[in-house]
């Protein structure tokens, strides 16, 4: 390629690395791939398209506040027309083209939507539904400051996408649900970065379980901005000697009784 093209590409890559933000690009269930929203592509090619399954996120920038209404499903969080079909007990895999931040927890949540006759997930108020955590991963080994976090270990540096599989609880009652993936990056002192994205699911199965009310959380609401796992400076001497980290948001619900 010509030198100008090379420079342009280098500049594009450099700016991507400087800002180092990102988000959940696609989903796979089995062999089927579902395209998500892409903030780098024109909105008119995506907004309201019948194939869209992900709520709109207009930029790769994080949500900086634990009390933002966009903590639920990013900004603006506009609902898509379609659903990803998935059977309870199966995996849905979130696909990130790249992820660059190394520190902080990752969580996945589900929330039941209104029935189809009541408008389905398009009619759901993402700030009012009851979200329950079904998956989490945080500090795997070592110290808060320098240890290995799942957020780092799921990254691939050979150009292949970063994959995040989550199992839909096998006993879950079937129906229309939203799935919410959140990466919380805490590499900047006292300035947490939340990266939430939501998709619409049509979950099939013969289960009957629903989470007890104690597991249902709201976004915002699930997190205290003063939570020491959220408002955190990982570069203190204390954190250099801390080997555990409490993932915010309470326990996961796995559907087992
Ligand atoms: Cu970033």
Image (spheres, rainbow, N blue to C red):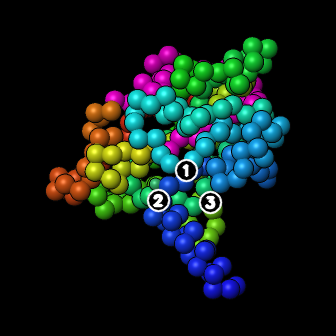
State how far apart marks 1 and 2 are (Cα).
Answer: 9 Å
Label 2: which residue?
19
Q: Position of residue 19 (x, y in %)?
A: 46, 59
State how far apart marks 1 and 3 are (Cα).
Answer: 12 Å
Q: At x 60% / y 74%, what residue is drawn?
A: 8
Q: At x 28% / y 51%, what residue is drawn?
A: 189
* Residue 134 as seen in the image, left or right of residue 46: left
Dot 1 or dot 2: first in sequence order is: 2
* Residue 237 as seen in the image, left or right of residue 165: left
1 or 3: mark nearer the eye = 1
Measured along the vertical axis of the image, is residue 196 above or below residue 103? above
Q: Residues within 10 Å of mark 2 (few under 14, many from 20)?
A: few
Label 1: which residue?
60
Q: Which residues are magenta?
A: 195-224
Give the total of numbered labels: 3
Report whether the residue tagged 2 is closer than 8 Å to ligand 1: yes
State how far apart marks 2 and 3 are (Cα).
Answer: 15 Å
Element under disc 1: loop
Label 3: which residue?
97
Q: At x 28% / y 58%, what residue is drawn?
A: 145
Q: Position of residue 215 (x, y in %)?
A: 48, 23
Of residues 160 and 7, the one nearer the viewer is: 7
Q: At x 42% / y 59%, what residue is drawn?
A: 102
Report whether the residue tagged 1 is closer than 8 Å to ligand 1: yes
Element under disc 3: loop
């Amino acid at each position: 390629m010509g030198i100008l093209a090379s420079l342009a590409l280098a500049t594009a890559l450099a700016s991507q690395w400087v800002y180092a933000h990102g988000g959940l690009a696609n989903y796979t269930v089995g062999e089927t791939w579902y395209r998500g929203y892409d903030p780098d592509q024109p909105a008119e090619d995506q907004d309201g398209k019948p194939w869209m399954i992900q709520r709109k996120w207009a930029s790769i920038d994080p949500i900086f506040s634990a009390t933002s209404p966009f903590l639920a499903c990013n900004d603006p969080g506009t609902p898509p027309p379609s659903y990803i079909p998935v059977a309870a007990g199966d995996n849905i895999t979130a696909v990130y083209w790249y992820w660059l931040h190394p520190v902080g927890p990752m969580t996945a949540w589900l929330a039941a939507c209104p029935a189809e006759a009541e408008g389905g997930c398009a009619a759901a108020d993402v700030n009012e539904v009851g979200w329950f955590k079904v998956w989490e991963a945080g500090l795997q080994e070592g110290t808060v400051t320098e240890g290995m976090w799942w957020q780092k270990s799921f990254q691939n540096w050979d150009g292949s996408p970063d994959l995040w599989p989550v199992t839909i609880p096998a006993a879950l009652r079937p129906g229309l649900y939203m799935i919410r993936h959140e990466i919380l990056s805490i590499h900047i002192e006292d300035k947490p970065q939340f990266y939430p994205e939501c998709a619409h699911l049509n979950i099939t199965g013969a289960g009957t379980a629903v989470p007890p009310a104690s597991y249902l959380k709201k976004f915002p609401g699930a997190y205290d901005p003063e939570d020491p796992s959220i408002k955190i400076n990982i570069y203190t001497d204390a954190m250099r000697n801390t080997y555990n980290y409490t993932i915010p948001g309470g326990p996961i619900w796995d559907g087992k009784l």
